[in-house]
Amino acid sequence: MTQRSAFIAVMGRPNVGKSSLVNRLCGHKVSIVASSANTTRRQVRGIRTDSETQLIFVDTPGIHRPKTELGRRLNLAATEASEGVDIHLVVIDATKDVGPGDTRVLEITPSNALVVLNKCDIASKPQIAKQLMRLGEFNKEGYFPVSSKTGYGVDALLAELKGRCVDPYLYYPDEMLSDQDELFRISEIVREKLLVELKDELPHSIYCTVTEYDPPHVCVEIVVERESQKPIVIGKGGGTLKKVGIAAREELGGRLFLELFVKVERNWQRNSAFLDGRGL
Ligand SMILES: Nc1nc2c(ncn2[C@@H]2O[C@H](COP(=O)(O)OP(=O)(O)OP(=O)(O)O)[C@@H](O)[C@H]2O)c(=O)[nH]1
């Protein structure tokens, strides 16, 4: 049987659960997840291949009203990612009323987009019904109440996506799960552990990058925006960094020795040269 494929852009405002949905649809972790908004900063592709189809999910940064140059670039990356794909998924948070951010995403996506109402595990039935009624006004082609957390409704969505695969070309080898390179994956895992450890205290101010990769030895630089943020990241007696290093190493399979350094780059989110240099 010929396998067929489709590129699928996963769009929505920040924090609605796009990365969680991509991870769930792929059946493995592709993108990091955090309770703060604007965690995803680049397009990340997650791939799910079976004997009949190859689904290529493009996880995009959340579309929002930008306050910094980084924010402006994130919006641009999200809209660029949605160009040329076969299917658009618009993710909406079932627990929050449809707001201007959601409306904007619904307006810029085509009428054959599918709307995914996420977080149904924590929304009441009347809340879900009300949301679906409201979203119906946008006349999209399909509506899927799901929970990325529990997996509720995800099979129905997957079946719909598989049915929409028409491209008779496979873009990635069967065993490939993501297009991320190893260095990016390591830096993202460190950033995720930091966000957890700091309880989302400085989510936007942190940028992580691998500065040395000589396995099993890896150095990761953690960039913050102000001198005052440095002790927060380091923690008392280096405690925070230590916990982050242990958690990240564990997720990476315990095979790497991570050395973490903290550096200050004043207001990097507003610094075009800094962002250019890092492909942001
Ligand atoms: N209860 C519940 N929580 C969810 C669900 N999906 C995502 N979350 C939580 O919502 C928060 C945001 O999830 P993400 O997947 O990072 O959201 P995102 O839309 O990719 O966020 P950005 O990268 O900021 O645009 C995290 O705390 C997730 O654990 C869900 O189905 N149910």
Image (cartoon, helix red, strand yellow):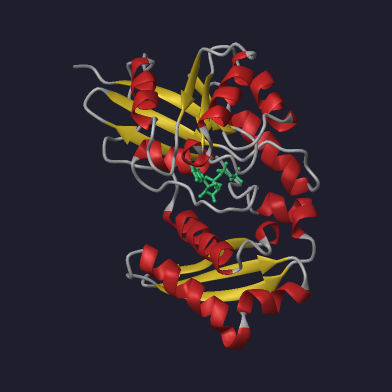
Please state if 216 lies on the left or on the right of 68 as rendered: left
In this rendered view, identify the residue nearer to me: 142 or 3.
142
Quarter of the displayed picture in which ligand 1 can be seen = top right
Q: Is residue 162 visible?
A: yes
Q: Is residue 261 above or below residue 210?
A: below
Q: Residue at x 38, y 63 (%)?
A: 251
Q: Residue furthest left?
A: 1
Please state if 80 lies on the left or on the right of 30 as rendered: right
Please state if 54 lies on the left or on the right of 59 as rendered: left
Q: Residue furthest bottom?
A: 237
Q: How many marks?
A: 0
Q: Residue at x 34, y 42 (%)?
A: 177
Q: Is residue 254 above or below residue 149?
A: below
Image x and y of residue 83, in percent: 59, 23
Image x and y of residue 261, in percent: 59, 76
Image x and y of residue 4, in percent: 31, 19
Q: Is residue 45 visible?
A: no
Q: Residue at x 67, y 76 (%)?
A: 232
Which quadrant would the N terminus be assigned to in this image?
top left
Q: Is residue 199 above or below residue 273?
A: below
- State which quadrant residue 216 falls in: bottom left
- State which quadrant residue 229 falls in: bottom right
Image x and y of residue 94, in percent: 57, 34
